[in-house]
Amino acid sequence: MTLLAPAPTDRETPPLVDTEFFVGRSWAWKSGPCAAVSHRFAVECEVWDALSHVLEPVVRPLRLPGQRASGSVYRVLARADHEVPYALYRDQRRITLATRPEAVAHALAAQINRQAIESSIDDHVLLHAAAATRAGITVILPAEQERGKTTTVAGLLREGYGYVTDEAVALDPSSGRIEPFPKALSIDRGAWPLFPECRPQSVATGTRQWNVPADRLGAVTERGSVGPPRVVVFPMYAPGNSTRCTLMSRGEGVRELAQATFHFPRHATRNLRTLAAVAAAATIAQLRIGSLEDAVEAIEMLVSQQIVEELCG
Amino acid sequence: MDDLTPEAVLRRRGEPELAWVEVEGELVVYDSERDALHLLDPAGTAVWKLLDGSRSIRGTSKHLAGAFGNPVEDVLADVLGFARRLQDLGLAVRLS
């Protein structure tokens, strides 16, 4: 029989710890209270100089200055003289060990997203979608990964739209209003040439996404709830094709919105009713995207029409 | 699966297996057992609403033919085809 001693790494930063584990540690940086829809949290780091350039863009857009701290605490611990120098915890559970600062930021952002969805699913209808506002009109862009949500919303922000989210639209089932989730935009490598102004000061080899706060695009972030969607556009990036906007029926809109809803079956009846109310009051279109410029122009057209309709009552 | 005749009686399935919502004459149905979404156009929605187990497919067709001013035999063919599809998808069950 072989007795396996715990690895030294596990003794220093074990997978599960008690609340006393963090007592007496020295924190080089504390975020203060933050929110991602219903997920309340704070971030504390033992080391900051080496991490600030990657963590600050992830955390800053979600800070809630002037509010009381509550909810979870994410902690980044330094593992001195280790080949894997960082450990990330959420409360008492270790989320990951990381070699590079970028991996810490990636894990933190992913965990915040996941918790935002899990903690908000019972009191919101959550769509996998980006969203932005102009002149009181809310535009949402529901889609799976790699369809062009973030790139398109980034293009809208550059044209003066207000920022709501690039990941999860949180609809209040009773009012249809949207709770912002203004996380840093996750701009994929393929879209980097479209947004040279967003390039971080340093980009480590192997980086696949830039985390870009909306203000880097000159956008104002929506802090309070915004009105129900009035323009719903399902983007589909199709390189090499022309950009084409096709109006959809409201029933098609509900079906597509349902398919874009996180954990739809958990509250199927509530979700269907909420999505039907959204569809009944919105212009709904599918947008095949050949170029960002044309996509933004097409959405501008839909928004302008909606503004005119609302002005005309 | 047995083939449907005009005298067959179907009833749409209901809650809790199905959730549905109507918007501008179209019906979006969610089948929780199969985790599937279906979209019915306005004609399909009209048939769906009549499949309440109280009348045969022929009776349903007569009702729709009267409402839309079409020949019963034309409507019957469409309703039969649609009813088969609903049965195949598990959205309606045959009562007799």
Image (cartoon, coloured by chain):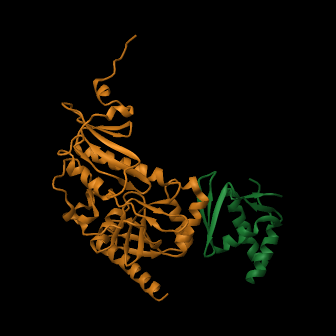
Chain colours: A orange, B green
Task: Please tell me whether residue A214 is drawn above or below residue B67 in the rendered image.
Answer: above
Q: Residue at x 26, y 51 (%)?
A: A208
What is the x, y in percent for residue A3? 37, 14
Question: In the rendered image of this protein, does residue A296 appear above or below residue A308?
Answer: above
**Left or right: A124, with A47 as reference point:** right
Picture coordinates of residue A43, whole percent (x, y) = 31, 47
Nearer the observer, A255 or A33:
A33
For the N terminus of chain A, give its image quadrant.
top left
What residue is at 39 percent from the left and 74 percent from the top?
A244
**Image position of A25 with respect to B94: above or below:** above
Q: Residue at x 19, y 59 (%)?
A: A199
Say left or right for A195 vs A144.
Answer: left
Q: Position of residue A77 (x, y in %)?
A: 27, 37
Residue, far bottom? A312
Nearest to the observer: residue A79 or residue B10: A79
Q: Position of residue A76 (x, y in %)?
A: 28, 41
Q: Nearer the viewer, residue B34 or A125?
A: A125
State the count of labels. Answer: 0
Quadrant position of residue A189 = bottom left
Residue A286 higher or lower than A36, as above or below: below
Identify the image quadrant of residue A47: top left
